[in-house]
Amino acid sequence: MTSPLHTPLCDLLGSRYPIVQTGMGWVATPELTAAASNAGAFGFLAAATIPPDQVGPAIERTQRLTDRPFGVNFLMDAPGADVISEAVIAHGVRAAGYNRAPDPSLIQRLKAAGVVCIPTCGAVKHAVKAEKLGADAIIVQGAEGGGHTGSVPTSLLVSQCADAVRVPILAAGGFRDGRGLVAALALGAKGVAMGTRFVLTRESPVPDATAQRFVAAGVDDVIVSTVLDGMPQRMIRNELIDELERKGPLARLWLSFRNAMELRRATGASIPDLLRSGLAMRRHERMSRSQMLMAANAPILARRAMQDGDPAGGYLPSGTVTGVIDDRPSCAELVARIVEEAETTLKNLANGAR
Ligand SMILES: Cc1cc2nc3c(=O)[nH]c(=O)nc-3n(C[C@H](O)[C@H](O)[C@H](O)COP(=O)(O)O)c2cc1C
């Protein structure tokens, strides 16, 4: 008998288990991605925070660390999305992950080359549109999820999306263990996608000072704020967010300008590139002008916390689930634990045991 944990997603992705490690800027490095895939999950390398011409070498590094399939996550409306897509195709990467502003021509190009296309959506209407544009599977992220997030709780959104689309969906937002995986399957998903849980693994590059903030945070410390770029983002409340909430619009605008210049240096994008990307985001997401100007805040301030180890002065994107996580296992330990707990839970359910 085949295991209920062997779902169509395992076949689509070539992974042993229906567990995905999501693309997280500054966090989903070649080391974390390879460790997740080696553990039997499916890792996504985060390319949105790498200069586009460095994505090819980062893929090669990941390929040196694992012979298992993995994906690359990037922003389709950002400068260099075409360069990243070509690197994905040229290196035979299994899957491409993307979210806002899907580009139909890039999706067609990726699909024609056999790349599995997996967008992340936070609303039913976006999932329906994503399927029409050619998604092979969809990560459905509920309100509990870290980073940019919607307002519908995971438990409601997953079942709604499972009813609304035919492609397999992965439930995201609030998952960390085997009981969660079984619950996601019961809701109609074919697997789970986890960000925050993988932030707190041994192979995650996050410095100890920042990891300790994640571990110390309670559920109530994880908030949704629009202060960074005008869009709702889930994060751990810290000194920076308190200060930004006190600051006036002019001070925030000055911060945005400085961060846009820093993003330009970090990604190698030119000013016209950034403007084009900002205008595309504005068109697709119905952003205001000030939201567009603030778009660089999140990646630059996240780097300060997640890479440079300054948890007070940077942005700490996190799902609510961090409030109930208090350890930092290796990816192999984590995946084995989730699978074992899911199998036990399924057995107990079948036997009527608690
Ligand atoms: C530290 C961190 C960084 C993230 N960075 C990105 C990113 O760069 N691009 C993206 O599409 N999603 C990003 N996300 C969202 C995750 O990919 C994922 O959808 C989300 O974390 C799932 O919810 P969970 O945290 O409850 O597992 C980030 C999340 C976290 C926690």
Image (cartoon, grey):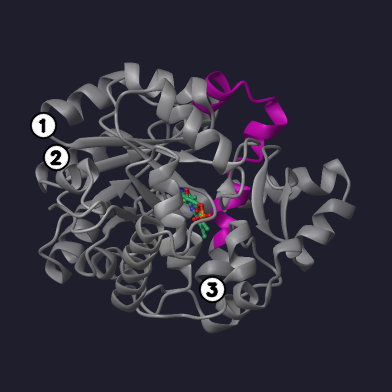
In the rendered structure, the answer to whether residue 14 lies left or right of residue 270 reads left
Name the image quarter holding residue 142: top right
Q: Earlier in the sequence, mark 2 or mark 1?
A: 2
Q: Is residue 301 magenta?
A: yes
Mark 1 crowdedness (10 Å alpha carbons): few <14, some 14-19, many ≥20: some
Name the image quarter holding residue 88: top left
Question: Which residue appears farthest toward the front when viewing the image?
Answer: 352
Callout 2 secondary element = helix
- Which of the two residues, 142 or 120, is positioned nearer the viewer here? 142
What's the residue type where badge 1 is placed? Ala
In the rendered structure, the answer to whether residue 14 lies left or right of residue 352 reads left
The residues tagged by marks 3 and 2 sit, at their Cα atoms, a distance apart of: 31 Å
Q: Are marks 2 and 1 in contact (CB under 8 Å)?
A: yes
Mark 2 crowdedness (10 Å alpha carbons): few <14, some 14-19, many ≥20: some
Callout 3 secondary element = loop
Callout 1 secondary element = loop
Q: Which residue is mark 1?
A: 113
In the rendered structure, the answer to whether residue 70 lies left or right of residue 283 reads left
The residues tagged by marks 2 and 1 sit, at their Cα atoms, a distance apart of: 6 Å
Q: Is residue 87 magenta?
A: no
Mark 2 CB lies closer than 8 A to ligand 1: no
What's the residue type where badge 2 is placed? Ile
What's the residue type where badge 3 is placed? Asp
Mark 3 CB lies closer than 8 A to ligand 1: no
Q: Which residue is mark 2?
A: 89
Q: Position of residue 85 (x, y in %)?
A: 23, 37
Q: Which range of residues does the magenta coloring cover?
A: 280-302
Q: Which residue is mark 3?
A: 308
Question: Residue at coordinates 12% horizontally, 53% vertically from top-left?
Answer: 1
